[in-house]
Amino acid sequence: MSHRYDVIVLGARCAGSPLAMLLARRGYRVLVVDRATFPSDTISTHILQPRGVAALSRWGLLDRLAATECPPIHTYAFDSGPFTIAGAPGNDEAPFAYCPRRTVLDALLVTAAAEAGVEVREDFTVEDILVESGRVVGIRGRSKGGAAIVERAPIVVGADGQRSKLANVVGARQYHERPLLEAGYYSYWSGLPMNGRYEIYIRHNRAFGAAPTHDGLTMIVGGWPYAEFEANKKDVAQHFLAMLELAPSFAARVREASREAPFVGMPVPNFFRTPYGPGWVLVGDAGYTKDPVTAQGIADAFCDAERCSVAIDAALSGRGSFDEVMHTYQRERDEHALPMYELTCQLASFQPPPAEMQHVLGAIHGNQAAMDGFVRMNAGTISPAVFFSPENLGPIMAAAAR
């Protein structure tokens, strides 16, 4: 027997579970399906930027993350070789960042969704997206070992990542596309204390960073231009460890530590998708994805889910037409995301900064307020458009000249 839901969400990770939870808290009947079971891992930068931490706090879930003993990160340090720019990534609302294992964070989110009244079906494979008269009306799928079942809802949401099945079926238009830019990998080390710091090293054609995560481990993530992907993938470990030698003092610390896992990673495409159409919506990486060099994915997913829940509520409650509210959702998403998207693609291209940017970085160095602003911009706490505005940079450059 087929059940009826207000919303069906495909994918239960950092976009899907929060969206489902927020809709259920508004009184809607929501089904979430995922082919995974939880806890389980997924490829991720792990970094939960302060604006994502602020979202957890608004949802009443931050204490749960803190209870997992994930170390808070109070300082980001960008080492470019000649000098280091270090500062605080957050603000009064959320002063810290975190670097949680996805085995922990995703399970926490799924549990919160279920507690809100969401029906969660794990180990569920979506076989077909049901389309009738040009409108998405539901899904056909099955749990492991089970018979095929059909579920229907007026809105089906794809929170199923960059390779979204829903986006593929409906032919969601892609725009602002960029080519693959970086080949990134990560692993975990024990015996590498970070003392609340996320250290980022920028070198010629290389970038890497280290942050403390669960179980006393430190995640090191790094990469090189996509042009080197085919050659370097034959021995990722050799090339990764050679990259760390570009920061000798950091490499010495790593040699005293122990790697506890294989290297994991993959190149990530860069694009926006039109996130809605008749009966369907895209959220998180399904609607907008970019290179992980700025580690914005989790925070973007949280904020996207929050914005999308407001739009879907307005449509289902009749306060606005579906097309009107989803057009607003897309416009607000793009206005917020585009400045960081452009910065991310620039950084992932590994092109040296132009002379003007080098001049700006030199002016920032040593000015703690300016360094905090630079770090907050990289963390996504403030927009690159705001940080690089004449109103902000003017006083910084003037102070440096004095």
Image (cartoon, rainbow, N blue to C red):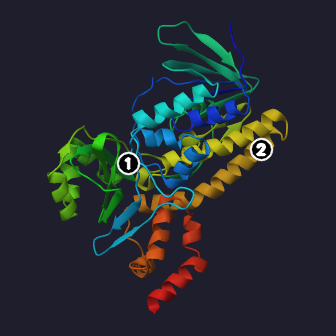
Residue 312 place in picture, x, y as percent: 73, 37
Residue visible at 56% across and 63% down? 382
Tell me the number on the disc at residue 71: 1
Q: Quadrant of residue 301?
A: top right
Give the residue drawn at x 15%, y 52%: 255
The mark lying in front, picked from 1 and 2, is: 1
Locate the N terminus by quadrant: top right
Q: Gap in Å between the C-alphas at discs 1 and 2?
A: 39 Å
Q: Position of residue 265 (x, y in %)?
A: 34, 42
Residue 402 location (% of width, % of height): 46, 93
Q: Residue at x 63, y 25 (%)?
A: 118
Residue count near mark 1 (Cα–Cα under 10 Å), binned few <14, some 14–19, many ≥20: many
When the figure is inspected, residue 160 is found, relative to residue 323, above or below; the finding is above
Quadrant in the rendering for residue 25: top right
Q: Residue at x 52, y 43 (%)?
A: 62
Going by the numbered disc 2, the residue's amino acid type is Val
Tag 2 residue: 325
Relative horizontal placement of residue 327, taking residue 235 as reference (left or right):
right
Observer able to see residue 187: no
Number of labels in the image equals 2
Q: Mark 1 vs mark 2: which is more N-terminal?
A: 1
Residue 134, horizontal then vertical, whole percent: 74, 27
